[in-house]
Amino acid sequence: MSFLKVSEVTKQYDEENIALEKFSLQISKGGVVSMVGESGSGKSSLLRIIAGLEVQNSGVVHLGDQKILNPKQKLVPGYDEIQLIHQEYKLYPNSTVEENIARPLLLYDKLYQKERVEELLTLLSLQEHRAKKPRQLSGGQQQKVAIGRALSIEPEVLLLDEPFSSLDAIQKRELIEELKLIFDELDVTVVFVTHEVDDALLMSEELLIIQKGKLVQQGNVREIFRKPKNEYVAKLFGNLNEIPGEKKTFIRPSDLEVRKNDGYKAKVDKQQYLLHYNLLTVELEGEILKWKVEDTSRKYQVGDVLHLSFDPNYLIRFEE
Ligand SMILES: Nc1ncnc2c1ncn2[C@@H]1O[C@H](COP(=O)(O)OP(=O)(O)OP(=O)(O)O)[C@@H](O)[C@H]1O
């Protein structure tokens, strides 16, 4: 059953900037989903509207039975139930980790406050940093404190708007993996926004793909990988090789098999050493087309002749 429901939301800042166009979305309770889309596709606008922090032109957002009111409709914008964290999220610089996490709990019973802060320090493995000020922490630890603060009042929804983009690649990967385990355990609904598919997949298998203010596809990564709705979605997962003579039909390099004498004949034109394989650029015999091939054995050289075949079930076709 849908818990967070966005119905036909349109957001237009001015004549040129239409951030969202009749955008609809449904997420079930306790789910963790990653939203992927290029810069300017409307991700931040959507999260701000979901959080009740931005006025939309039309459309509505519901959290369960509750209609989310925007800043024009509500005196104090935003909701405790919906917490939004972004890259520039500010901690209180002169307060300790413990105090930062406790801040939203000031009106709560003292004993509960103490227990909740302990719970979060443990959950986020921040116990040894409890007395430190934000400037004494790494970027990743600071973002964990921000998440701890957001989780302190047990929100229903946590919206993460590229919160880790200032971290280095290793720090980011480790933090996302750690948070994924935490979110999977909690009953909180999480929307993690990123423009990197790799990061999205570290967080969840459930993906939302946004393009030019519209939700183009929602589903499990396996399904989206095999049946992408359009070329943009398909290319988020890597290169596409065009099938000669067939319109809008492609095969992924990872679905190609190199055979001795069966399939498309091709000559290696270029070889690049990448992390998990050598990426070959090959010229198809009798065609102007070039294909990409993932050589996991790293044995082919420029000038080698290969035969490439594939399972036709893996062909990707788009409507014209
Ligand atoms: N305050 C604003 N005034 C005018 N236009 C805006 C404003 N905020 C966003 N836009 C425009 O709305 C569109 C969507 O922006 P938004 O920030 O929501 O996208 P995004 O997917 O989050 O992008 P990024 O990944 O770069 O943050 C863009 O064309 C942007 O220029």
Image (cartoon, rainbow, N blue to C red):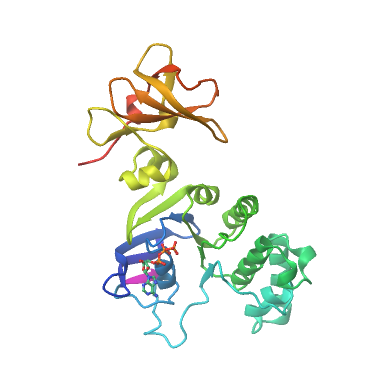
User: Which quadrant of the figure shows ligand 1?
Assistant: bottom left
Which residue is the extreme one toward the top? 261
Which residue appears at 40% of the width and 38% of the height? 239
* Left or right placement of residue 137 versus residue 91 in this view: right
Of residues 274 and 28, the one nearer the viewer is 274
Please tell me whether residue 189 is drawn above or below residue 258 in the rendered image.
Answer: below
Q: Position of residue 110 (x, y in %)?
A: 72, 81
Return the residue nearer the eye: 107 or 281: 281
* Magenta stretch contains residue 61: yes
Looking at the rendering, the stretch of residues picked out in magenta corresponds to 59-63
**Dominant secondary-structure state across the stretch colored magenta:** strand
Q: Image point 31% across, 29% down: which residue? A: 289
Residue 187: within the magenta? no
Q: Nearer the viewer, residue 264 or 234?
A: 264
Residue 29 in percent (x, y) is at: 47, 60
Q: Position of residue 40 (x, y in %)?
A: 39, 62
